[in-house]
């Protein structure tokens, strides 16, 4: 895991441990080294100030970032428990309203995008790892977790980006029908730009993107895949997957699910894995002790192991 991701994980861990002073120091380090993360760091700082009884500092932090052109998903701001102490403040309401205005303007400008590694056409078709970003992120930021440059010598790695705006340079797959259309369209772009072995396609993703990748893998059309790799998938209604699992029995797909025992979707993910096994769909479940809704530190090794297994 690269330095930025390590620092992000450290921030979240320190929040959980209520070690707020060190969390603030770590956020400051991210701001200094990665100024492009200002939309995230300003939000984290505001949450930290709000939680520690410093509402004025929280509002000042958000207002300063707003002046620089940043903004945040208005619903997230109103529903985030860390920001609850700010909800009745007029200054905070003004920030939310301005974020909502910018959100509405941005919704009309969103367009689907694609990152592809390597981008050059190979003579011999190679397998494809097709990865869906999680909610509230971009393809570029999300790609860092997968370190595609390490995999590109023997496999294509593609990251379609949704056109659905979630926040500042952040996207989601909330509209399922639109999401599927864009994912299919970008898949067609991939196979037109590089030589893909279409019998060696792996769908992958995390959180909302992991849930969607899992569903598309089981649906098996129009993209036929060999397997799936999903990280902390946002699985809620396990019963709702029964018919899909039944239909997928004869597709001979296999998969990997990587989650943490502290993830808020952990119980339903375990139940889903149990249903897959009962249906005869081969799926390896990796549970990382103490991990919440994030990537494991050894994800690069787990990803390599999963690809070796599914592409053998």
Image (spheres, rainbow, N blue to C red):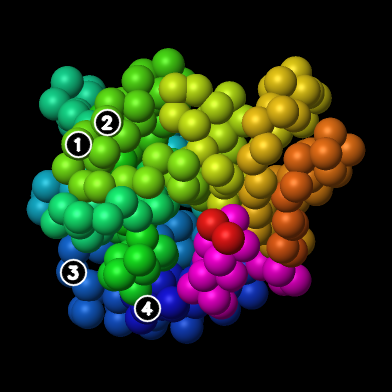
**Which numbered disc flags the more N-terminal residue, 2 or 4?**
4
Residue annotated with mark 4:
2
Which is in the foreground here, disc 3 or disc 1?
1
Q: Residue at x 22, y 72 (%)?
A: 34
Q: Residues within 10 Å of mark 3 (few under 14, many from 20)?
A: few
Circles 2, 3 touching at the beta carbon (< 8 Å): no
> Which quarter of the picture shows residue 140?
bottom left
Mark 3 lies on a secondary structure that is helix
Q: Nearer the viewer, residue 119 or 67?
A: 119
Is residue 295 on the magenta stretch? yes
Real-space Cα separation, disc 3 to disc 4, in angstroms: 16 Å
Real-space Cα separation, disc 2 to disc 3, in angstroms: 35 Å
> Considering only vertical position in the picture, is 190 above or below 61?
above
Q: Quadrant of the C terminus?
A: bottom right
Residue annotated with mark 2:
188
Residue 253 position, x and y percent, is: 64, 40
Real-space Cα separation, disc 1 to disc 4, in angstroms: 31 Å
Residue annotated with mark 1:
192
Q: Residue at x 58, y 45 (%)?
A: 227
2 with respect to 311 (left or right): left
């Amino acid at each position: 895991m690269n330095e930025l991701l390590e620092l992000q994980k450290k921030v979240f861990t320190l929040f959980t441990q209520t070690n707020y002073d060190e969390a603030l120091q770590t956020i400051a380090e991210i701001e200094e080294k990665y100024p492009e993360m200002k939309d995230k760091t300003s939000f984290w700082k505001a949450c930290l100030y709000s939680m520690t009884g410093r509402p004025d500092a929280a509002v000042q932090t958000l207002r300063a970032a707003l002046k620089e052109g940043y903004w945040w998903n208005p619903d997230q701001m109103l529903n985030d428990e860390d920001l609850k102490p700010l909800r009745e403040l007029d200054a905070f309401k003004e920030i939310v309203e301005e974020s909502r205005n910018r959100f509405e303007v941005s919704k009309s400008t969103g367009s689907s995008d694609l990152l592809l590694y390597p981008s050059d056409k190979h003579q011999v078709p190679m397998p494809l790892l097709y990865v869906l970003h999680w909610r509230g992120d971009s393809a570029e930021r999300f790609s860092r977790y997968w370190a595609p440059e390490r995999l590109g010598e023997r496999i294509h790695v593609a990251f379609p980006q949704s056109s659905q705006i979630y926040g500042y340079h952040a996207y989601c797959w909330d509209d399922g029908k639109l999401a599927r259309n864009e994912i299919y369209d970008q898949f067609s772009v991939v196979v037109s730009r590089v030589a893909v072995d279409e019998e060696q396609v792996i769908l992958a993703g995390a959180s909302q993107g992991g849930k969607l990748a899992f569903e598309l893998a089981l649906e098996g059309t129009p993209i036929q895949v060999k397997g799936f790799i999903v990280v902390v998938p946002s699985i809620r209604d396990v019963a709702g997957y029964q018919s899909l699992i039944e239909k997928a029995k004869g597709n001979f797909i296999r998969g990997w699910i990587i989650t943490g025992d502290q993830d808020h979707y952990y119980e339903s993910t375990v139940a889903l894995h149990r249903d897959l096994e009962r249906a005869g769909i081969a799926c390896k479940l990796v549970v990382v002790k103490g991990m919440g809704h994030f990537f494991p530190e050894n994800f690069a090794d787990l990803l390599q192991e999963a690809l070796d297994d599914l592409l053998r």
